[in-house]
Amino acid sequence: MKGRTVLITGAARGIGRAVAELLRSRGATVLAPSRREMDLCSNDSIDTYLAALEGGVDILVNNAGINPLASAGEFTDGDLQATLQVNLVAPMRLIRQLSPGMAERGYGRIVNISSIWSGVSKPRRFVYTATKSGINGVTRALAVELSGSGVLVNAVAPGFVNTELTRKNIPEEGLREIAATIPMGRLAEPEEIAEIVAFLCSARNSYITGQTIFADGGFCCQ
């Protein structure tokens, strides 16, 4: 990672923070813009941030995401617009701006953070599942487009992760019930997901591209 510049979205907490800390510890220069610096809900904000960047970005980790819970009969236009924007449109705009430079330099890594709900689903994940399935499709299409350029593109689909937000939203009893549904019997730690992302971002990954790796303790195998 030494000498590489990484741009990661949603790095203030959880998986994003774990990825940023790990890549930084391995020598990367990590750009982790706050919402004030780059608001993914605003295309103008994204464009302004990217226009001000100095030097190239070698690695892009599209981590930020939102998940307003609503069924097919419940979701609002605001839910739809915001979730599509943050989970799908913003990553695509970042890719559009940054991937040509990676290809010109002959090296790049793009990792999109997806979700188990792109492979399976449950009630009230209607819009979220659509966007995360979309980012898997973006991953495959971009991997083919950039094949042979030195740029590898993959996605990681975490399952249930022991983050601050998870613990805030789910009581202890609920966490135990969730763990009982996972073959490995526990939630993932953010650092475990970060290790997968770090490998995919590194030069050690020389042949994996276009894949969505489910890191879910076996949940989706059931």
Image (cartoon, helix red, strand yellow):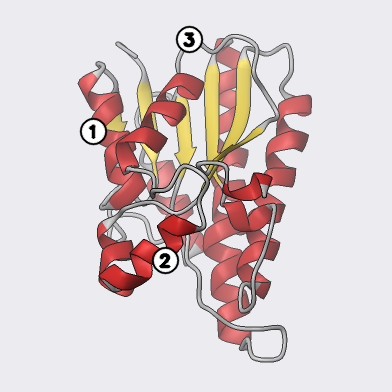
CB under 8 Å between discs 2 and 1: no
Q: Nearer the viewer, residue 173 or 143?
A: 173
Residue under label 1, please give it.
21
Q: Residue 135: image x %, image y %?
A: 65, 49
Residue under label 3, please give it.
203
Q: Which mark is residue 177?
A: 2
Mark 3: which secondary structure?
Answer: loop
- Quadrant for residue 20, please give it: top left
Q: Is residue 209 above or below residue 177?
A: above
Mark 2: which secondary structure?
Answer: helix
The residues bearing labels 3 and 1 have C-alpha atoms spaced at a distance of 18 Å
Q: Residue at x 62, y 28 (%)?
A: 153
What's the residue type where badge 3 is placed? Ala
What's the residue type where badge 2 is placed? Glu
Which label lies toward us, 2 or 1? 2
Q: Is residue 123 above or below residue 147?
A: below
Q: Residue 21: image x %, image y %?
A: 23, 33
Mark 2 and mark 1 lie on one chain; the one further toward the N terminus is 1
